Amino acid sequence: MKFNKILLFSVLFLFVARLSADFAIDGNRFKTSPFADGFLTVYGSEGLEEGLLGVDFIMNFQHAPIIVSGGNKVIANQLTSDISIFYSVVKWFDLGVSLPVILFENGDGWNKDDNLAKAGVGDLRLVPRFQLFSLFDKLISMSVITEVTAPTGKQIHSALGSNQFTFRPAIALGTQSKWIDAALNLYYHVLPKQTFATSKFDDEFGLKLGLNVHAIEKLLDVNAEFHSATSIKSPFKNDAQDNIEIGGGVRFKTPANIDVIAGAFGGFGKAVAVPKYRIYAGISWNMNVLPPEEERNKAEFKLKKREAKQEEQPKQEEKKPEEKKVKKAPKKTAPKQEAALPQQPVKTGEKLPNEVHFMHESDYIADTVEIEKVALILTRNFMLKIRIEAHTDRHENASFAQKRANAVKAVLIKNGVEANRIKIKIIGAAEPVANGDTEPDMVKNRRVEFFVVTD
């Protein structure tokens, strides 16, 4: 699988590199926020959850004398709104599309023939990301991002975008832990040699470094970023391209999968289109529109139902001749149900073979057969009690362990088990039975188990 991913990326990269003469950017460019994952402009290296769909809406105000042409046309202030949509096709490949909308801008040096547009649409940005590997439970991960920008803004007004397509391949390295995430982006810009507003431009190399601290777990993140770029031909000696930008902000998380984002950045240097400062605020929303684990769980539950029916059919066939001889079918029904059950354990502390599995972040019980078997054991052994142990996988909200335990307890009570004979123990993700990140492993960890107790 890893070889196939690398081969796919190599073919795409060679195809785009073949068109490198057409993929270039001129000096007329604007620093709007691109599609982002986790950080505001630094790309994360860890792949998204398969089937995840998200939308970002970020307002960005920047103040800087951006020279547009000839050194006499300037944009002093600019208010933009980046609308980004992303979707994870598979876990190792996701695609983002970002469209900056200029809501307001003003400046000096513009005449009636080329009046500055007060608003418009900027350059459309396409951001495919290929995850090459993720090791040691996301401790080290690496992705390749091939960002492409189309000159859609220029079609509306010369001040709304660049003249040509842009192509900027980048390597994203990252690490994730319970409290801190970090990402490093190294990118290369293919620029045509040109002179713009008395400034010379050449190929550009840059880096972005992001740090994300989970200050309050599942509620508040604090992030900081460092951006820098320089000319390849004259590193740290080309004022038109050399720049440094430092900033950060906060991200508030809500149970509705909506994050509220806010912060600020400050720019250093005289590079074209780098603002003196900018402030931003916005919201980010995401949901899993087609989680594959649900489909797999449904298939697994259907298989269990089929197996249960196959076990009951021979018993029903055995019952028919008995009905003809004895002619007391209602009295024979209960013993036949007993025969379908496994041997009933009565030892204190023994784990029952019955387990209930769940879909990702769900407490829905698709099949109650295993719980009903446990209820039948308890109704025939009045001295026994049961302890429910509820588990989650490591990617789920911990609260689902309690919800699953409550759901299973409700089914037991419905089947005649007294509430005071049911105990609950919340394990969460602390005791996985499978350590992998594949869906079959995650299904095994999303479970409820039963233990016999007498106290």
Image: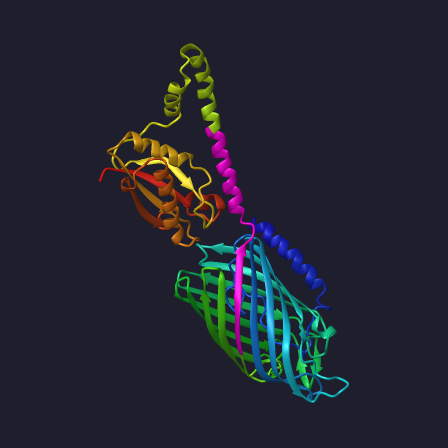
Counting from the top left corner in percent of width and height, residue 290 is at: 56, 50
Q: Is residue 290 magenta?
A: yes
Q: Is residue 256 above or below residue 436?
A: below
Give percent across and percent down for residue 410: 37, 42
Task: Say whether residue 236 is visible.
Answer: no
Q: In the displayed orientation, state which residue is furthest to the right.
A: 113
Q: Residue at x 51, y 59 (%)?
A: 46
Rendering colour mode: rainbow
Q: Is residue 392 left or right of residue 98?
A: left
Residue visible at 68% across and 83% down?
Answer: 68
Asked whether 48 or 338 is in front, the reply is 338
Residue drawn at 47 percent across, 73 percent down: 249
Please give the count of numbered marks on the rendered protein. 0
- Is residue 441 visible in the rendered image? The answer is yes
Q: Give coordinates of residue 44: x percent, y percent.
A: 52, 63
Q: Nearer the viewer, residue 421 or 160?
A: 421
Residues shaded magenta = 279-308
Quadrant of the rendered structure where residue 375 is?
top left
Q: Residue furthest left?
A: 455
Check the picture and name the quadrant holding the C terminus: top left
Q: Position of residue 21 (x, y in %)?
A: 73, 68
Name the image quarter holding residue 445: top left
Q: Is residue 39 above or below residue 332?
A: below
Q: Is residue 349 left or right of residue 116?
A: left
Q: Is residue 201 above or below residue 351?
A: below
Quick check: 79 above or below 180?
below
153 part of magenta stretch: no
In this view, the residue in front, 321 or 330, is 330
